[in-house]
Every structure is written in C-alpha cells, then in structure tokens.
Image (cartoon, rainbow, N blue to C red):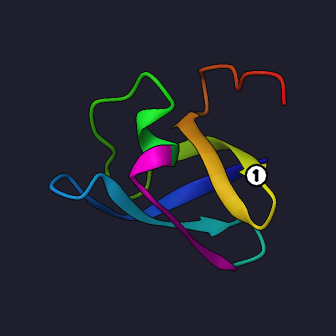
Amino acid sequence: MQATVRTFDETTRSGTVFLDDGTVLPFGAPAFDAGPLRLLRSGQRVNLAMSGDEIGYITLSTFPVPDA
C-alpha cells in the first residue's frame, strides 16, 4: 500500500500519512524503526505494510516492503 507523509516527528519517530483516498493514518516508532529510514519529510511517498489495523512498517516508495 502506498501513502504520502503528512507529518513526522524526529523526536518520537512517529507521524501520520495520507492514503490515496485522503484517509489519515497514524504510525508509531515501531513501524518507523522496522525499516531502514533515518527521517521522513512531509510530501514523501512511502510504502506501508499493515499489521492488523495499524501501520506495522513504513519505508520510501522506492524501497521494497518485506513479505508479510
């Protein structure tokens, strides 16, 4: 699934994304820490892997998402 970064807080390593339909979803530090990223900027396209109803993994759209 792809989305666009809405907000990102470097201190908490958490933020929010916009899905393509405009839905806003939050992600926490565990989703950010699961990937290879050091920071995100508003407007960046990202790939997501969901874990139940939450984002379990987030990375740049050019990076692969691990198999679920």
Q: Secondary structure at mark 1?
A: strand
Quarter of the rendering containing residue 43: bottom left
Q: Position of residue 45 (x, y in %)?
A: 55, 45
Indicate whether 31 appears above or below 15: above
Q: Position of residue 59 (x, y in %)?
A: 54, 34
Quarter of the picture containing the C terminus is top right
User: Number of callouts in the render?
Assistant: 1
Magenta includes 28? yes
Quarter of the rendering containing residue 40: top left
- Which residue sits at x=68%, y=63%? 54
Instruction: Say whether residue 40 is left or right of residue 60.
Output: left
Indicate whether 42 appears above or below 64: below
- Nearest the camera: 47 or 32? 32
Q: Position of residue 36 (x, y in %)?
A: 43, 21
Instruction: Say whether residue 4 is left or right of residue 6.
Output: right
Magenta includes 57? no
- Which residue sits at x=23%, y=58%? 12
Q: Residue furthest left?
A: 11
- Nearest the camera: 48 or 45? 48
Residue topped by disc 1: 51
Callout 1 environment at 10 Å: few (<14), some (14 to 19), or many (20+)?
Answer: few
Q: Position of residue 9 (x, y in %)?
A: 24, 61
Indicate whether 47 appears above or below 2: above
- Which residue sits at x=64%, y=55%? 55
Type of amino acid under label 1 = Ser
Region rendered in magenta = 23-30
- Which residue sits at x=76%, y=51%? 50
